[in-house]
Image (cartoon, rainbow, N blue to C red):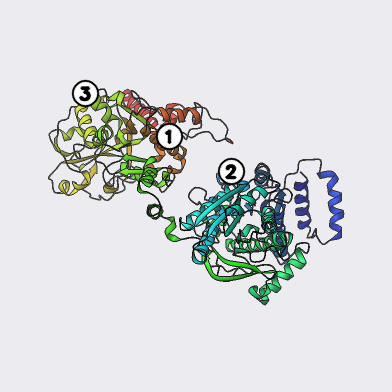
Amino acid sequence: MEQLFWASARDALRRLNIAPRRNAAAALVLAAMAGSMMNDQVHAAPPGSNEIRIGNTAPYTGPASAYGVIAKVISAYLDKVNAEGGINGRKVNMITYDDAYDPNKTMEMTRKLVEDDQALFILGTIGTNTNAAIQPYLNSKKVPQLFALSGAAAWDQPGEFPWTMGFLPTYTAEAQIFAQYILENHPRSRIAVLYQEDGMGKEYLKGLRDGLGGKVAIVAEAPYKVTDTNIDAQMAKLKASNADVFIEFTTPKFAIMAIRRSAELGWRPNHFVASIANSYSAVIQPAGPQNAEGLLSAAYRLEGEDAAAAGDAVFREWSAFMQRYVPSVSKTNGQAVLGYLVSKTLVEVLKNCGDDLSRENIMRQARAIKGVQLPMMVQGILINTSPSDHAPIEQMRMMRFTNGNWQHFGPVRSGIDPGAVSDSFKTIFKYGTATKRDLANQLNANTVSLMTGSFGSTYAQVGADLASVLDNGTALRILPVMGRGSVQAVADILLLRGVDAGIVRKDTLAYLDRKDFAKDIRNQFVYVAKMFNEEMHVLAPKTITSMRDLDGKTVVVDLPDSSTFVTAINVFERLGIRPHLIYQEPRLAVDMLRKGEVDAIVAIEGKPLQWLNQVNDRNLHLVPVDYAKPLQEEYLPSKLSAADYPGLVADGGSVETIAAEAVLASYNWAPNSDRYRRLSLLVDTMFDKVAQLQRPPFHPKWREMAPRATVSGWTRFKAAQEWLDRNMPPGAAVSAASGAVRPAAPVAAPAAALAPQERDPLYREFLEWRASRAKASSSR
């Protein structure tokens, strides 16, 4: 509450052009305001047209209070910007609260900043766990989370978190730079590692291991907790390993302990310290410069007193700013330089926004930083971002503490190996460092083979989408297999080794059961979920006006193993139509149709079909498929519109047709089997990411996926039902627009289950169709 008061009061003073830090009257004004404001909940007024309101939390108190300097410097730099006229004529108002490095408090304060203070975006939150706490919330609200101050890789995931952007080199990248240096200069060394037992420490450790690639041994590892009061036991263990390289991935408090304790033990290995804990004033000075002699680290920013490296003009500007706006903070404090760099980058982004200060444009400009060299940054290191790269800084330079100063040496190094983003490269690399059997077991353990459809089909595209979204290294890999349709998929699931699941059509299963082609198939097959509806397309010359006209005609119905084949013969049988069937892939039969060699082509797939969209022939059209009573047991009514096929349907028009249901199915594996376990991995991951799959650029048919919808007469895969019971109990939120069911989010109001006509667009169309037919009948 106190922080909110001071932020609001300072905002009020700024509106009066009173600088709180330097005007004695400000203290009187604040004191006068205190009595009336401190006892009531304060809500900031909406930002004016001449204001850019920014939200921030920082650890001004608590175990990481040394980092509070960063936010102080950012706030001070924005005061400087405002004193010089603001940005594009607007004043910048940063409201900042103390989160004490507590993720719960960070979440509480961030929500206040967004919902009460109406901050345009959140800037420079400090810490891994604190940023992780607010990342889902800000992305769900589409509020930019700019320049998260932590080296975790999670801030560079634009596909999953498009509203989050990091700033620092990642912990992984920095550790790989250490590994590069060790491989070049100490290839026969023995390494000991002290690391913080949390996500930060583990990312650093993983980066080091990956960078070393097993070529240099890590002989000892010792974790510590942030609540530990000393690290004496860890240091004793590491020294006893006889390591000649000591790397610490620690925060400043524990870096001080490690440097001191190493000196006390008389242990003098080649000592590396992480960049987050190499500040002279915050670490080296308290640990004793004499104890830090020879210490190694990496840096992307300059030291605040390094006039030679900065250059006269840059150093004068930096010094003048610090002396005038934050005289209480030492220029030797590396965190102050970081705050300065964040401020400079922010100003660059906001200037580029021009008059469009929408959140979308702010994020767009943040993603468009190209080759920016900031003052007080190591020469040669540039800031670059793009829509697919939310990591502004990816380079560092090694440095050594010598004669009381950090001295840079060697080339600017990149912690990002372009080849390292390839999972296949990583696998091949591991092939040379692990036994073949172990590697094969690891890769195969969580691989799921999925039978899809023929090239260019909806099934094939859906399988590719699943692989794109769900693949997660060795944790889960989806292997889409090009198939030949629904009938072949059923046979492959039943008989082909290694096939775990497949996309099949409900009417295919029903046809096999009705014809008794597969004994007891209802007990052997289970479904995971209804995927989408597939429309029946009948392409023919305009002389064919109805399905009845196909009686005795020559009709292409795809290959005999395909799902189109089964649906076509099923529909013809139910309608009493007996055409002459040609077994050819529909996309390969268009020329035959144009030449008059066949009378029609049937294709049953999810609209729009890529090959059919390329047909633009004034003599051809889509034949309507009447939703006759014999079809209503197994199919749904649907329409093909001009939006689906502009070359075949007149503007504003539509063609009635039917749709069959596609399901994801599998063999009914025993719950204690490995195949059951692997399929459960697919289920859990796919259901968790349905919302992502339902957004472009993935196939529009994903929007019809309804995980909770049942497939009558068939049993759901047990693990899928258990997931739904946990995450989508009756009453969970339903997307009426797509028919997709979403788990109710913690912040969302509960929604009642919708009626079928609200849940399924095709069912809604059926009701409209039935009503129009009833009206037509009564008028006759």
Question: Position of 7 compared to 456: left or right?
Answer: right
Q: Which residue is mark 2?
A: 137
Mark 3 and mark 2: Cα distance apart in space:
53 Å
Mark 2 Cα-neighbour bin, 10 Å: few <14, some 14–19, many ≥20: some
Q: Which residue is mark 1?
A: 739
Closest to the observer: 563 or 287?
287
Residue at 76% x, 41% y is: 41
Q: Amino acid at mark 3?
A: Asp
Question: Position of 704 compared to 354: left or right?
Answer: left
Q: 346 above or below 522?
A: below
Mark 1 and mark 3: Cα distance apart in space:
33 Å
The picture places residue 165, in percent across and down from the top left corner, at 56, 54
Quarter of the picture holding the C terminus: top left
Q: Which residue is mark 3?
A: 516
Q: Quadrant of residue 720?
A: top left
- Look at the image and tell me whether residue 155 can be seen: no
Quarter of the picture holding the N terminus: top right
Question: Position of 373 compared to 550: left or right?
Answer: right
The picture places residue 487, in percent across and down from the top left corner, at 24, 34
- Mark nearest the camera among 2 and 1 is 2
Which numbered disc, 1 or 3, marks the residue that appears first in the sequence?
A: 3
Identify the element where label 3 is drawn: loop
